[in-house]
Image (spheres, rainbow, N blue to C red):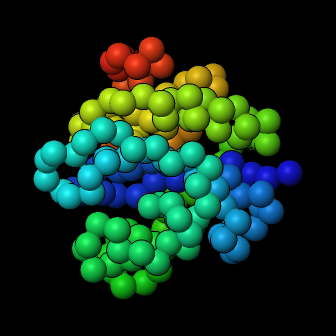
Amino acid sequence: MGKIYIAGYEIFAGEGHAYLVYDPNENLNSTNDQLIIRGGPQFLDPFPPYGIIDFEVAEISAESLDGLDNLEDADDNHFPENDKNEDGIVDTWADRHYTTYSGWNDSLWNTMVANATELAKISLGYNPVGPNSNSVINTILNLSGIDFRDVLPVEYAATAFPGHLDLLDSALSSSYTA
């Protein structure tokens, strides 16, 4: 039985990015088996256009843009993706504020993966203030009966996650506010 975490880190000026992590062996010191659900911009340039929301569903840590094992520099900022705070030191699960809650289990993870797989069919424009990566996580949690604001990564307030009030429309047409 594995463990689910919500994680986050600062993107810019105190604003955060949230994502979900499944650790099948429940050992946070071995991250190469972790699976990640996240959303983000199609184009990683810090300036528009951002393209559509790009989804990662149960992506292995080494291949996820949020993976603690990802050594790539996908955004060309001269730091690997596993060093989000750009201090030259590989991030740890503590740096990413991994937070778990009772009742989060394998069955819930399977539901989250199924919901994320369906949402990944959406072609919705990415906007830094929403809909965005935090809207993806808010929607997946909402579809699982969980309020994003009740399960924030430790040390964060909901307002640190722009787009956290947006719910993506599975009818492929729009987003709504939670």
Is 165 left, or right, of 142 in this rendering?
left
Is 154 left, or right, of 76 in this rendering?
right
Q: Residue at x 27, y 80 (%)?
A: 78
Q: In this picture, is 74 found above or below 54?
A: below
Q: How many marks?
A: 0
Q: In this picture, is 30 found above or below 107?
A: below
Q: Position of residue 29 (x, y in %)?
A: 69, 74
Q: Position of residue 157 (x, y in %)?
A: 40, 42
Q: Residue at x 52, y 53 (%)?
A: 7
The quadrant in which residue 110 appears is: top right
Residue 68 in view (yes/no) = no
The quadrant in which residue 127 appears is: top left
* Residue furthest right as drawn: 1
Q: Residue at x 71, y 58 (%)?
A: 23
Q: Quadrant of the C terminus?
A: top left
Q: Residue at x 40, y 39 (%)?
A: 134
Residue 43 in view (yes/no) = yes
Name the foreground residue: 54 vs 103.
Answer: 54
Q: Position of residue 126 (x, y in %)?
A: 28, 38
The quadrant in which residue 65 appears is: bottom left
Is 175 left, or right, of 27 in this rendering?
left
Q: Position of residue 3 (x, y in %)?
A: 74, 51
